[in-house]
Image: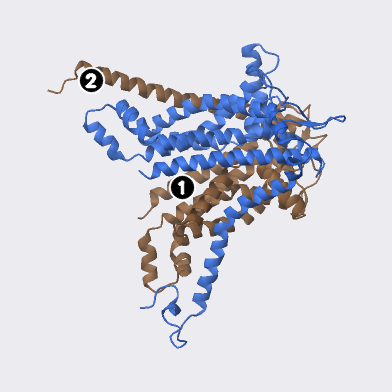
Chain colours: A brown, B blue
Amino acid sequence: MFEATALNARNRRVQWLFAALFGLMTVILIVPVVLILGVLVAKGGPAISWDFLFTMPRSGMTQGGILPALIGTIWLVVVALIASVPIGVAAAIYLSEYAPDNWLTRGINLAIINLAGVPSIVHALFGVGAFVIFAGFGASILAASLTLAVMTLPVVIVATRESLQAVPMAFREACWNMGATRWQTIRIVVLPNSVSGILTGVILEVSRTAGETAPIMFTGAAMFLPFLPQGVLDETMALSMHLFVISNQIPGISEEFKYGTALVLISLVLLMNAISISFRTYLRGRKKW
Amino acid sequence: MPDSRGQGAVTSSSDLDYRGRDWYVDKAVSVLVFVGGISAIVLILGIFVFITREGVGFVFGPMEVWEFFTSPFWRPTSLSEPTYGILALMAGTASVTGLAMLIAVPFSLGAAIFIGEFATGRMRESLKVLVEMLAAIPSVVWGFIGLTIMNPLIIETFDVPIGLGVLNSGIILGLMAAPIMTTIAEDALKAVPDAYREAAEAMGATKWQVIFKVVLPAAKNGLMAAVLLGVGRGFGETMAVLMASGHSINLPTSVFDSVRALTATIAAELGEAPVGSEHYRALFTIGIFLFGITFIINLAADIFVRSGDKR
């Protein structure tokens, strides 16, 4: 009854051809990266050991481990989160719960987009001008972390705003009708229903912060330090900076060491990212409304 | 009936004014979140003010603005006569970003169409997650890949003496920008209402006819924004370009030439330039230029997205 005419058959062939073409483009985009990651694992894997992860570097970083870089990255990430999460969450609450649709809100949105889009090295210049010199923190964990916090603020704002807006309006209205103030509604109804979404954003921010190099190069990350940082006004080594230094600045570092460092950094970043993504998928699947 | 936030708004009589602790807490919080809300604007202005503050002496100082942009000679450390011309650096950035976009734009639009229009169910979800993960690879790792994996590969394949240059950093940057462009482009395709597709299908259009005649034209603003944001990303990338481009000052004539980008120049030299020196100010001036260009790119992308929304 409905037999394919010659034209239909042709159309179907063309369609199959297009699907194959676009599919191939997708594959070409993904495969090299997966291969590269495979090389990183194959060449860096043997370097990973207890000593590599948890001892100090020795003999001009050609021997020993990456402990100070690992600890330094943790310092930088934690201080950056302390600075950016409260501000980011406040900004998201304002945008989601308070902001009227006016020029100021449009300005804020544009500023967020730009904050995310400004080159990382420009953030570094800002960090040098504002935190290292003007605020007088010098090259320190504090200055580097604040620079990272400014840079990753959009990540927290966007993720938090999204999860706040996912809470149905009826929940808020029900609460207002009980006589609750706007803040009581946010505290009792909106935030508890979106806290896991906010957490997803925070984990994503950890992943971004840990991988950045340019913003910390001149604001607090050192090429080499023989000791661990004692406080926020100390300089520190960092994993990303360490990878840059041993692969680009210092000759005579063994291949294994470089690949090992790259593998640790990328594992850390991708692990955080994977946790964030699977957490988000889980939450979407579980949503009650 | 008193309204929910400020019962006192109903009357000014103190008998009926039951503004309590809750009312004040509510007011305080609304001020606090407002401060948080405008923080993004304050920070963007702060970035502009601080980099201008450090760079401003240079703009009206030792050389003509015109010369700054048109001289190919960047010799900040010359003892006899230091010159600060960023033409070669701009050529470096443009050639690398250009090649990267040549690679990334077709492939990421193709991938976005495949993921958004052809792939279904589990395959679609896993592809999206995979693309998202690729976007998270740190730029210093990309630089490392350019230096240790791509470099020998290019030397071997094309029989050239050095594998660091436009080709290497262009490919690296293309691979870096593609996942982000794919994600944004896929969002733009998803924003086209299904009713459009159904209407076209009901007219007897095949899938590819629907895509080319209906979906792509309807999504073109969003796709344009995706491309622009990809350009912005490539333009502003620092570490990968610093490590994979060879970092020597050149007006490139072939893809194997080593070049130096604007961003990489700041990253390589800021540490050695004494605070407040001419060289230091020149680097901040490049920063102002980068800030300005990315601002324009982001603004343009935003306008494209906005004009798409009106539909």
Which subunit holds the residue at mark 1? A
Q: Nearer the viewer, residue A122 or B21?
A: A122
Horizontal and vertical percent position of residue B234: 58, 33
Reply above or below: A206 against B10. Answer: above
Q: Nearer the viewer, residue B262 or A64?
A: B262
Residue B173: in sight, yes or no?
A: yes
| Amino acid type, label 2 | Asn
Q: Which residue is mark 1?
A: A280
Reply above or below: B155 against B57. Answer: above
Q: Secondary structure at mark 2?
A: helix
| Amino acid type, label 1 | Arg
Mark number displayed over residue A110:
none
Q: Residues within 10 Å of mark 2 (few under 14, many from 20)?
A: few
Could you tell me which residue is drawn at 57 percent across and 24 percent down? Answer: B99
Q: Is residue B153 left or right of residue B278?
A: left
Could you tell me which residue is drawn at 61 percent across and 21 percent down? Answer: B167
> Of all residues shown, which one is farthest toward the bottom?
B15
